[in-house]
């Protein structure tokens, strides 16, 4: 009766590895490559697979044992092997049975691919782990590839990993419900079902981010549920996309707009004659346009997944408009070439059409930069979210009169709080600082706006 001993193969120089899980019991029928135990060293965890199909007649290790290369793991009665050995239902190795080649079928190529496709985890010496396998000595003919996982990350059997690869699922995203968080086939199926059920562009759930559980608010008091507008949902998707893709930095400053406000007050009569209103916004737009011209990096966008930077030779600026249906961002073209009156007229006209939902899609495209003004509403600062693929956005809060030291005394000055958020992949602190300082300087001395 041929009894085969399964030993620990070369485990990549690990002095000793702990048995953290027994995957089979005496009497179990196993197929070739089926994991028998899971070993964990300080670098990686790995399954020690059956080197032949048959019945486990003896398990020579227990959980907690420290094993080194060559240590005996189990005895398999090869004579009792059953060609179609049925795996234990519910275990992830269930597919291994159907997937597993018959004894002697496992080619070198297959072994290599199992090693190559071992999942990669974060912050771990994966290269070391994989090379440990690649450098494994030539094992007996029956030797099977190690099923490598990285310590502290994912436990899953070869069949589950194979299925995950076929489905394109990263195992790190799947919650394992097996012993020690082992990912079972059912976990993978459950994950796929959940992803399929999620609406396209769902606000949560993707990229391994844990989703916020649904809450039954009615349990705590009376509620009314209303469907969100399409615009609100679209805004949510855009905000979320930017939030998860863009490393944001926000920089704050205050512009002394006392002179600007005095000048603006003097324009009111003319504004009435022109049937328009003049708020600080057109001045802000003009200041941003000139600062963009002087700081071209802020007037750029990433392209080809970050390989290129697109420098725009035009200066189109979006203005966030609060409408009953949700947030809209019409874009004012060639701001650097327009007068303050032209800008005032255009902002009023676009904002009014935005509120009436009469904007054309083309009027909300092509922006290089965005200004979001909450000046009329209040607050002394906020951190706006970059309107991708733009790389920066200016948030404007409510101006207030504050005492400012002029070198001799405190004088009342009208100070406008501004905040610049930028994409730190493109804009560094120096770029952001120079740009915001330029805006502040232009607003503080509006004579420069005409230059
Ligand atoms: N500080 C103090 N007062 C301000 C100000 C500021 N920063 N900005 C505007 N004001 C004043 C204006 O001067 C005006 O008063 P007067 O008529 O006495 O001059 C009054 O507030 C109303 O201004 P407005 O809001 O009608 O006009 P605007 O040009 O400043 O802004 C628009 C136009 C369309 C940007 C604005 O109406 C709007 O929708 N803002 C909201 C943008 C938003 O929601 N951003 C958040 C996006 S992220 O969620």
Image (cartoon, rainbow, N blue to C red):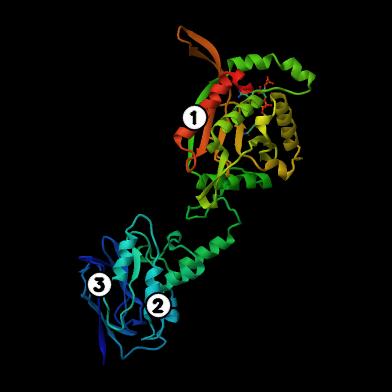
Check contact, mark 1 vs mark 2: CB within 8 A. no
Residue at horizontal 48 percent and vertical 53 percent from the top: 210
Q: Position of residue 362 (x, y in %)?
A: 72, 44
**Dot 1 or dot 2, earlier in sequence:** 2
**Can the viewer see residue 27?**
yes
Check contact, mark 2 vs mark 3: CB within 8 A. no
**Dot 1 or dot 3, earlier in sequence:** 3
Which residue appears farthest toward the bottom when viewing the image?
1
User: Crowdedness of circle 2 by 10 Å Cα count: few (<14), some, many (20+)?
Assistant: few
Residue at horizontal 34 percent and vertical 61 percent from the top: 126
**Can the viewer see residue 384?**
no
Q: Position of residue 218 (x, y in %)?
A: 58, 47
Q: CA distance from mark 1 to mark 3?
A: 58 Å
User: Taking 223 as reference, is 263 above or below it?
Assistant: above
Q: CA distance from mark 2 to mark 3?
A: 19 Å
Quadrant of res 368: top right
- According to the picture, the residue beneath numbered tag 2 turns out to be 110
Depth check, mark 1 against mark 3: the one in front is 1
- According to the picture, the residue beneath numbered tag 1 turns out to be 434
- According to the picture, the residue beneath numbered tag 3 turns out to be 10
């Amino acid at each position: 009766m041929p009894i085969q001993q399964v030993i620990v193969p070369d485990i990549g120089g690990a002095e000793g590895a702990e048995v953290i899980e027994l995957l089979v019991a005496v009497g179990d029928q196993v197929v070739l490559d089926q994991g028998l135990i899971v070993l964990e060293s300080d670098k990686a965890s790995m399954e020690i697979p059956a080197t032949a199909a048959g019945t486990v007649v003896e398990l020579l290790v227990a959980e907690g044992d420290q094993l080194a290369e060559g240590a005996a793991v189990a005895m398999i009665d090869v004579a009792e092997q059953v060609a179609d050995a049925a795996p234990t239902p519910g275990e992830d190795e269930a597919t291994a049975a159907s997937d597993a080649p018959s004894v002697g079928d496992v080619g070198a190529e297959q072994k290599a691919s199992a090693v190559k496709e071992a999942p990669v985890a974060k912050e771990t010496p994966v290269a070391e782990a994989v090379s440990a396998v690649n450098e494994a000595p030539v094992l007996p003919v029956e030797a099977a590839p190690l099923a490598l996982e990285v310590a502290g990350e994912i436990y899953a059997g070869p069949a589950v990993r194979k299925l995950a690869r076929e489905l394109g699922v990263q195992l790190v995203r799947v919650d394992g419900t097996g012993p020690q968080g082992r990912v079972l086939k059912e976990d993978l199926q459950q994950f796929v079902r959940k992803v399929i059920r999620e609406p396209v562009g769902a606000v949560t759930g993707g990229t391994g981010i844990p989703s916020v559980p649904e809450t039954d608010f009615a349990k705590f008091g009376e509620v009314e549920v209303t469907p969100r507008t399409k615009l609100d949902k679209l805004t949510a998707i855009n905000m979320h996309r930017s939030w998860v893709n863009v490393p944001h930095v926000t920089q704050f400053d205050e512009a002394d707009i006392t002179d600007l406000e005095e000048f603006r007050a003097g324009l009111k009569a003319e504004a009435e004659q022109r049937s328009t209103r003049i708020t600080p916004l057109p001045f802000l737009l003009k200041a941003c346009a000139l600062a963009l011209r002087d700081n071209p990096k802020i007037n750029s966008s990433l392209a080809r997944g970050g390989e290129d930077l697109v420098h725009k030779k035009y200066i189109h600026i979006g203005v966030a408009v609060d409408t009953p249906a949700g947030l809209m961002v019409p874009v004012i073209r060639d701001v650097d070439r327009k007068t303050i009156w032209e800008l005032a007229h255009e902002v009023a006209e676009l904002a009014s059409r935005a509120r009436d939902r009469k904007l054309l899609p083309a009027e909300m495209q092509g922006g290089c930069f965005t200004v979001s003004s909450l000046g009329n509403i209040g607050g002394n600062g906020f951190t706006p979210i970059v309107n991708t693929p733009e790389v920066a956005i200016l948030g404007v809060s409510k101006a207030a009169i504050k005492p400012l030291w002029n070198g001799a005394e405190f004088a009342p000055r009208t100070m406008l709080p501004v905040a610049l958020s930028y994409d730190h992949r493109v804009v560094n602190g120096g770029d952001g600082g120079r740009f915001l300082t330029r805006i502040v300087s232009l607003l503080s001395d509006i004579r420069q706006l005409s230059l």
